[in-house]
Amino acid sequence: MSSSIISLLALVGKQITIYLGISILIAGVIGGLLNIIVFLSLRTFRESSAAFYLTIMSIFNIGQMLTGLLSRIMTSGFGIDWTLTSLSYCKLRTYCFYMCALTSMTCICLAIIDQYLATSSRARWRQLCNMKIARRLVLLFVFIWIIHNIPYLIYYDHVISISTGKVTCTYTNTIFQQYNIYSTALIIGKVIPICITFVFGLLAYHNVQQLSYQTVPLVRRELDKQLTVMILVLIVFAFFTNVPYIIVSILLVIPGLTQDPVVAAQIQFANLVAMFLVYIYFASPFYIYVCVSNRFRRQLIYVSFEIYHNRWQPRRMVINQIMPET
């Protein structure tokens, strides 16, 4: 009976990895690219520090899915493990995965802090929301995570299992393994960002309610409202998709809980589902923006048809005029 449950969970997990994983990957990459196109095409967004953070976040979200989700799909879904065929990929995959994940969570924290300052009644605080400071902060944190993640390049290696004789790509240092589980994956990567976004999200929401009473230009006021709503809904979604992963991660490190094979298989299955919830969060920003912001939908249509479609039309007309003569 227990073996059948374990086999069933393994089979369901494989199907989830293949079908749900591929769907998330495709939707996430397309959504991330559309975010980047919209944010970079409109001057309104190019001059906004909060939109700059969201643009950088979209870039690293794509990187996170290509380094993490794609590899998981190939390994768990199709049995193709690139980390075993290349030592460089074994080291770089984990390094880039945490690099992208940490930078993405940092950007959402910076974005909501920026919106709190931008919607503040204090003019001095609003002046802190500018592209010069935003670029410096992003470069600073990217540099911090580049240095912080160097141990992944050192302590991830090909290890031959004594019991099975198979090669695996895993930690070679127990202390760093514990640091990664408790600090990077949980505290730095999940708990701290959730706490920061929760606190500043409440403060920004309170500020937005007072915007109509502030002497702020109408265009700037509407942009602040739009970005704040988009970021706040994304934060709420991040909370509900990341908290299950935190809970399951805590269960995995409880001594003696995984001694029963059935319980261990159930927790591993729960960990798989929680992991895909996290990937759904990284793939979701574009679709959340479209759903919650009518202004973003109009901006998307404008960028798609008024800018790029009309830009392409004259080229096609010129080609059609030249081809008959040639």
Image (tube, rainbow, N blue to C red):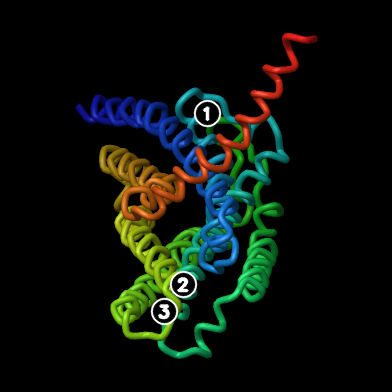
Amino acid type of disc 2? Arg
Query: 105 or 273, which lies in front?
Result: 105
Q: Which residue is mark 1?
A: 74
Residue 143, quarter of the rendered image:
bottom right
Q: Which mark is residue 220?
A: 2
Q: Are marks 3 and 2 in contact (CB under 8 Å)?
A: no
In the picture as drawn, the residue positioned furthest to the right comes out as 326
Of residues 326 and 211, the one drawn nearer to the viewer in this rendering: 326
Q: Residue at (58%, 30%) from the top-left corner?
A: 81
Point out the tag, 3 or 1, that comes first from the N-terminus: 1
| Spatial CA span between label 3 and label 2 | 10 Å
Q: Which callout, 1 or 2, points to the residue nearer the camera?
A: 2
Q: Is residue 125 visible?
A: yes
Where is the N terminus found, in terms of image quarters?
Answer: top left
- The amino acid beneath tag 1 is Met
Q: Residue 63, relative to residue 175: is it above or below?
A: above
Kind of element beneath mark 3: loop
